[in-house]
Image: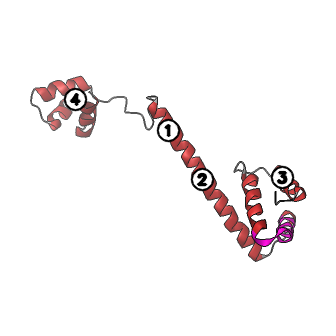
Amino acid sequence: MLLSETMRSRLLEMEAEKTSAVPGLMKHLLWCVEVYLREKGEAAAADTVQRVSKGSVDPATSAALAVLYTQVQSTMSEQHRQRVLGGVAYAQARGVHCGRPRKADAPDPTKIRALRLLGRSWAQCAAELGTSVGAARRAFKVT
C-alpha cells in the first residue's frame, strides 16, 4: 500500500468531519491520492493532504483538486446511471410498467376495434368516442 496509515486515517477523519452528498467520495479520493503518490512521490502527496486539511492550498493544487473532484464525480455519476438502467431493465423483465401512467379516461380498445371493423376512419372513431386520433390509435394498438 503506497498511502501511509497516517495519511489514510487523516483523510478518513476529514470524511467523518464533513457529511458528503456523494457517498464513498473519500474512498475514491484515497485511490486518486495513491495514484498521485505513484506519480509525484509520498512527500509531495503528504504535503498536499496536510494543506488541504488545513484549508490552505495554492491555486495550482486547487486546480488539480478540482480536476480530481470532477473525475470522481463523473465516475460516480456513470456508476449511478448504470445502476438505474440495470434496475429499470430488471423491472421491465418482470413486467413492471416504467414511465408515466396512461390517462385514466383512455378510450375503450374494443369499441375502437368494432368501429374500425365497420370501416370508420380514425377521425370518425375519435369523434364518436370523444377523444383524439392519437389516443384512439394507442388504444387500438393495445388490443
The amino acid type, in three-letter code, at marker 3 is Leu
Question: In the rendered image, which quarter is residue 39 located in?
Answer: bottom right
Q: Position of residue 99 (x, y in %)?
A: 44, 38
- Mark nearer the N terminus (4 vs 3): 3
Residues tagged 1 and 3 counted as in contact (Cβ below 8 A): no
Task: Give the number of the mark in front: 4 or 3.
Answer: 3
To which residue does mark 1 refer? 88
The amino acid type, in three-letter code, at marker 2 is Ser
Q: Quadrant of the N terminus?
A: bottom right
Q: Specify start and end residues of the magenta stretch as a single range.
A: 39-52
Residues tagged 1 and 4 counted as in contact (Cβ below 8 A): no
Q: Which mark is residue 68?
A: none
Q: Alpha-carbon distance for marks 1 and 4?
A: 35 Å
Category of crowding for the residue at label 2, using alpha-carbon neighbours closer than 10 angstroms: few (below 14), some (14–19), many (at least 20): few
Identify the residue at horizontal 60%, vertical 53% (top origin).
77
| Vertical arrangement, residue 103 with respect to residue 70, above or below | above
To which residue does mark 2 refer? 77
The answer to whether residue 131 is seen in the rendering is no
| Vertical arrangement, residue 2 with respect to residue 113, above or below | below
User: Which of the two residues, 30 or 51, is positioned nearer the viewer here?
Assistant: 30
Q: Alpha-carbon distance for marks 4 and 3?
A: 65 Å
Magenta region's main secondary structure? helix
To which residue does mark 3 refer? 12
To which residue does mark 4 refer? 129
Question: In the rendered image, which quarter is residue 3 located in?
Answer: bottom right
Q: Alpha-carbon distance for marks 4 and 2?
A: 47 Å
User: Which of the two residues, 25 or 17, is positioned nearer the viewer here?
Assistant: 25
SS type, badge 1: helix
